[in-house]
Image: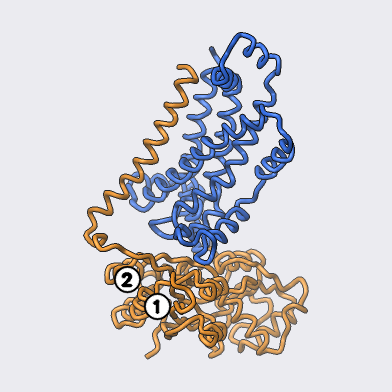
Chain colours: A orange, B blue
């Protein structure tokens, strides 16, 4: 075969592949009666913990079945999710940084903010517990971790968890920036941060859901501090205000907020994780 | 090490059981990568040919730009495309952000300079005497270009292979502009990142085997096509 003949052949092969793939998706769409009414896209900006725990994998198909929207879930840190709300690049937010959320409501960027669920943050560390913090209060354990020169791995990415951690340092009247090398800023998601903490035999603040999901990879890491009221991790859902931007899908956002606080959804959240971990990952406000 | 074997076993299991999600993710990966490489090839080869053969003021400057483009970090490409495709951005009305089209755009941005630069280098290496001779034999412009194309066909295929390698391995930009949305923009590389952050190293490894197999098959086919000409 000459090279001359080769190029068209390659092109035909590639086109066949490309069009073949797109064909299968359109056929699928035709078979689905739901798509007769045009589905509009609804962009949900949320934190990685709701995706990494698998909760959204359960909620997304259920929401789409009950509502005629195509839910696009963008899982980023809470910092980025809130910024997407301010810029109106998302329609609805599901995040866990109450103080920062209130600012968004105050500035008029977000409306219809509703409490959805909570779980708790925990401080995990090596099972040997070199700083001897097991069972102490949050303030005492943070002090001890620093005094004992043990490593503390921070998310360092402006996420909800990171914001919470900074709040806890402040409450304990400690400045993590002054700790030097033992304070490690990972700049990554919770999963990666837990891995770093485990490798470095360090301590870290994590949400319980992500820790339970990762536990199988870190046999040496244990929950050392839990149950303090300051460790509550509250998730809110809110609509992005469509007043300043006509591209925001306000109707869809409203539908999602209503879906998240409906009784059926509450039931799903309550039971989520029980089968796999023997305990629920998220709790509801009764 | 045990995990490696486990991952390989899981990959074979996933493929044999015809896991629908894996199938869709793999298909989308292929669709996006091949479309991007195809467009890069269709634009990059003529552009590279022009840059390699023509002489005009500012040519060296453009060549330098294209060479810099070869090293464009995918994350930077992703960030720029995000800014352009934002609702508040200049192309916001298209609503392309978080669609496969956005991923294809980012992939083109990182692979086009590679195809263009490598093609232009190939054309620059043609002996000028050959061009003179072909012209002297009375070839038309199109005939001349066709003959030169045949002269550098190996290098052109190498350019396509390099472009494809860049595209199929890319993750940062695809994550940023695609958003890793399940069933829509989730491709093999972004799902590997996600599964790692979920702590599912076995699934991530399984996906990595599927990705590597895919890359191997396509690169092998292209290499085979490239090398079988050599015996002539």
* Residues packed near mark 1 inside 10 Å, few (<14), some (14 to 19) or many (20 plus): some
| Residue that appears at 73% across and 35% down | B57
What chain letter is assigned to the residue under label 1?
Answer: A
Q: Quadrant of the N terminus of chain A?
A: top left
Neighbour tally class for label 2: few under 14, some 14-19, many 20 plus, Cα within 10 Å: some
Residue sitting nearer the eye, A233 or A259: A259
- Of the residues under marks 2 and 1, which one precedes in the sequence? 2
Is residue B183 found left or right of B108 in the rendered image? left
Dot 2 falls on which chain?
Answer: A
- Picture coordinates of residue B231 (x, y %)? 54, 14
Residue occupying image coordinates x 76% and y 71%: A181
Q: Is residue A268 above or below residue B199?
A: below
- Quarter-of-image position of residue A41: bottom left
Residue at 41% x, 83% y is A116
Say which quadrant the C terminus of chain A sits in. bottom left
Q: Is residue A159 above or below residue B226?
A: below
- The residue under label 2 is A63
Please state the horizontal and vertical placement of residue A166, each as a whole percent of the image: 65, 81
């Amino acid at each position: 075969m000459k090279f001359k003949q080769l190029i068209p052949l390659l092109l035909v092969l590639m086109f066949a592949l490309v069009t073949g793939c797109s064909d299968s998706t359109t056929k699928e769409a035709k078979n689905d009666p739901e798509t007769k009414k045009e589905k509009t896209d609804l962009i949900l900006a949320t934190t990685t913990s709701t995706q990494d725990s698998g909760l959204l994998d359960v909620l997304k198909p259920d929401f789409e079945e009950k509502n005629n929207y195509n839910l696009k879930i963008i899982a980023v840190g809470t910092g980025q999710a809130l910024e997407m709300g301010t810029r109106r690049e998302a329609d609805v937010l599901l995040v866990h940084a109450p103080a920062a959320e209130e600012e968004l409501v105050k500035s008029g960027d977000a409306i219809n903010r509703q409490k959805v669920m909570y779980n708790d943050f925990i401080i995990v560390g090596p099972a040997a517990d070199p700083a001897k913090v097991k069972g102490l209060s949050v303030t005492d354990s943070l002090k001890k971790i620093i005094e004992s020169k043990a490593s503390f791995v921070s998310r360092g990415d402006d996420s909800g968890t990171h914001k919470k951690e900074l709040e806890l340092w402040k409450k304990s009247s400690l400045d993590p920036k002054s700790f030097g090398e033992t304070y490690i800023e990972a700049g990554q998601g919770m999963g990666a941060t837990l891995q770093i903490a485990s490798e470095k035999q360090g301590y870290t603040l994590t949400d319980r859901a992500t820790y339970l999901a990762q536990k199988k990879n870190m046999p040496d890491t244990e929950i050392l501090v839990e149950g303090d009221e300051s460790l509550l991790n509250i998730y809110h859902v809110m609509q992005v205000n469509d007043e300043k931007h006509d591209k925001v899908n306000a109707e869809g956002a409203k539908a999602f907020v209503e879906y998240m606080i409906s009784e059926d959804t509450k039931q799903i959240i309550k039971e989520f994780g029980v089968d796999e971990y023997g305990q629920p990952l998220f709790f509801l406000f009764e | 090490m045990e995990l490696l074997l486990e991952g390989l076993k899981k990959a074979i299991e996933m493929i044999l059981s015809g896991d629908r999600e894996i199938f869709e993710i793999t298909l989308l990966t292929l669709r996006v990568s091949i479309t991007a490489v195809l467009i890069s090839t269709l634009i990059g080869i003529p552009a590279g040919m022009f840059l390699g053969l023509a002489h005009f003021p500012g040519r060296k400057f453009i060549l330098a730009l294209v060479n810099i483009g070869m090293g464009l970090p995918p994350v930077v490409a992703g960030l720029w495309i995000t800014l352009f495709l934002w609702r508040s951005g200049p192309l916001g009305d298209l609503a392309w952000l978080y669609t496969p089209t956005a991923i294809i755009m980012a992939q083109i941005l990182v692979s086009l300079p590679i195809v263009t630069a490598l093609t232009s280098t190939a054309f620059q290496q043609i002996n000028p005497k050959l061009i003179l001779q072909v012209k002297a034999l009375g070839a038309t412009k199109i005939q001349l270009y066709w003959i030169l194309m045949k002269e550098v066909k190996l290098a052109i295929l190498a350019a396509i292979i390099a472009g494809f390698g860049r595209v199929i391995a890319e993750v940062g930009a695809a994550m940023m502009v695609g958003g890793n949305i399940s069933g829509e923009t989730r491709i093999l590389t972004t799902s590997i990142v996600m599964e790692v952050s979920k702590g599912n190293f076995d699934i991530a490894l399984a996906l990595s085997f599927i990705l590597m197999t895919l890359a191997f098959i396509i690169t092998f086919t292209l290499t085979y096509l490239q090398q079988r000409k050599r015996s002539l």
